[in-house]
Amino acid sequence: MSLVNTTLEGDIALIEIDNPPVNATSRAVRQGLLDAIIAAEANARVAAIVIAGAGKTFVAGGDITEFGKPPMEPHLPDVMNRIEATQKPVVVAWHGTALGGGCELGLAAHARVIAPTGQLGLPEVKLGLVPGAGGTQRLPRLIGLSTAIGVITSGRMINAKEALAMGLADQIAEGDLRVAAIAHARSLIGKLLRRTGELPVPAFDSATIEKETAAVTKRARGQHAPVEGARLARLAAEVPVLDGMKDERATFLRLMKGEQSEALRYVFFAEREVAKRPEIPAGSARLVQKIGVIGAGTMGAGIAIAFLDAGHDVTVIETTDDALTRGRERIEGLYARSVTSGRLTEAAKAERLRRATFSTALASLSDVDLVIEAVFEEMTVKTELFTKLDSIVRPDCMLATNTSYLDLDAMAAALKDPSRLVGLHFFSPANVMKLLEIVRGAKTAPEVLATALAVGKRLKKVAVVSGVCDGFIGNRILAKYRAQCEFMLEEGALPQDIDGALEAYGFAMGPFAVSDLAGLDISWARRKRLAPTRPASERYVPIADRICEMGRFGQKTGAGWYRYVEGKRQVDPEIEALVKAHAAAKGLPQRRFTPEEIVTRVLVTMANEGAKIVEEGISARPLDVDIVLLNGYGFPAHRGGPMFQADRMGWSKVVEVMSAIEASDGPPYTVSAFATVLAEKGEIAAERNAL
């Protein structure tokens, strides 16, 4: 069966792209579309042309399996140019999602009709690319330069109403989309065709465009694609469309060969692979609708909202009436903010809150399908709670802990049936952050794990399975690289040196700025709890403790590692003096660190600990480590993750740097056996990603 088929609707040629599941513009589709356009133009019975997509969507982009391979003719830009040059009216009928090449196909047509639920976008920037088939040159001509820069550099989705308002769509179909598109095409017969590539870019204010371009560069934090996208959009105002498209195509191909696009394509596939667990029987997940959330603090409220947003019925439990009232107000307040910002309607807010109940009685959970505790991070508190729940909830009710560090197996031992306990480690704010670490205990049942993964999917989380260890995947790696950052303070670096190097690398915030944002008192309390069991031989930096003793807990107190004036971070000479005094007292050799040295030390520490996590079976494969760091810890997506980066720098380099760290800092920083094997064999971790 052909992937592109033409039928006649009277004097209208209806060209249908039928390449399931998303009608990607593969080579066969490009050739079929080109042949169909040429044939329709040559057919005397055809007066106009409509291009539509079969199935649930129009064209959701290019064939990503062709990325990185030599381009094959016909090239998509040539197909688009041929469509635009057609002497008969060409109208696209957009439905579902028209992304990338699907959106560009519409830009090359003479008119665009969209279904009320249709969505458009040029998401190439999310793969480290720019639109490669005329998008950067035609879009500014159609909707204006400023708006086009925003669309191209963000990769965001545009709904039908916005598309009509900005001039990207000419009509929102009422009733049958194809009938509307055919009628629109028929109305253009005999009229002067509006070819997007021949339009001038609408007038714009140069100063505004300069400001917007500078903002794109700042937000990009080292990413090339957004900056190039803005440059190419501006080029549309300076050169003819075909000249601009030559530059666009050259830029597209150059970026595709670069490491950033390679990293982002790796992330694209890894996020789709990470939840696939072949050892879990298909169809073994239980149906989960009624949820109990114990604890209505910041984390508990966020978890409750995440489940309410996904359509669940949620019962929120607190210990006292006052705490319950505060929890209810917290949830209602977050929803009120969503309404104020326009992300949610008042009706949607009311519908969600109708599915929420609040109680101080654990007995209210007797009929729920899943209970998640988000109580104080203390083993005794959690085990006592699970012991109580054991006699309240149904025997088939799943139990979950949101612990960040504690031993899941020790908690499970408090249950009559330890197989029903699983870790659901959300990240704050739980209703916003994408990552969900699913912690599998030694006795967690396969169907419980399958259900946890299904829950993550329904919540639209990126769910990663972890085994049991201190801190699981993410916090375990965080503890190691954060310690190395503090060690560098003893060796001559300052907080702003380390934060600056990592932010220049692409992190939104460095580790010391993140600590100030989260609140230094939280980690201080944990360090004090762990102090009695900390080995005397372990290298420990007490600077953060001294800062907390000064009453500096971060942004909320106006001072932490930095001081904050009107909310803006400023280097504090008092902290510089404290760091230097401690370093001098420690007697370690002092030196200046280059940004490259700082980044390398952090990346190597991350990758080495990630390799240990893989070799111990805590994660099933290296990509799990990358996905956790990318989605929960601010690792820049265009860098691919620490395991991806270690593959690029070579594991021999990881072993070399880590050996020096081990010699300096002792047993917690031993070189991973897995890293050593990869180095000796000259292999990459990515080769171990298949399950």
Image: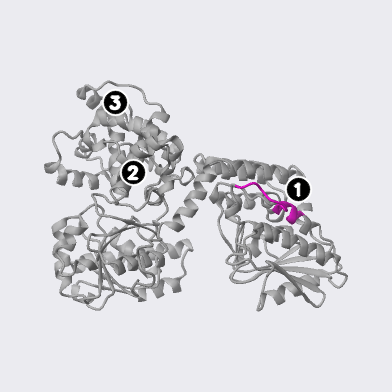
What residue does disc 3 label?
491
**Mark closer to the observer (2, 1):** 2
Marks 2 and 1, the one that precedes in the sequence: 1
Could you tell me which quadrant the N terminus lies in? bottom right
Amino acid type of the residue tagged 2 in the rendering: Ala
What residue does disc 2 label?
611
Amino acid type of the residue tagged 3 in the rendering: Glu
Secondary element at image label 1: helix
Left or right of 607 on screen, residue 36: right
Could you tell me which quadrant the C terminus lies in? bottom left
Residue 230 can be seen in this image: no
The coloring applied to the image is: one colour
Marks 1 and 3, the one that precedes in the sequence: 1
Residue 471 can be seen in this image: yes
Residue 104 to residue 232: above or below: below
Left or right of 499 on screen, residue 523: left
| Residue 686 position within the rendered picture, expressed as x and y whole percent measured from the top left | 43, 46
Marks 2 and 3, the one that precedes in the sequence: 3
Disc 2 + disc 1, Cβ < 8 Å = no
What residue does disc 1 label?
241
Q: Which residues are magenta?
A: 69-81
Asked whether 27 or 493 is in front, the reply is 27
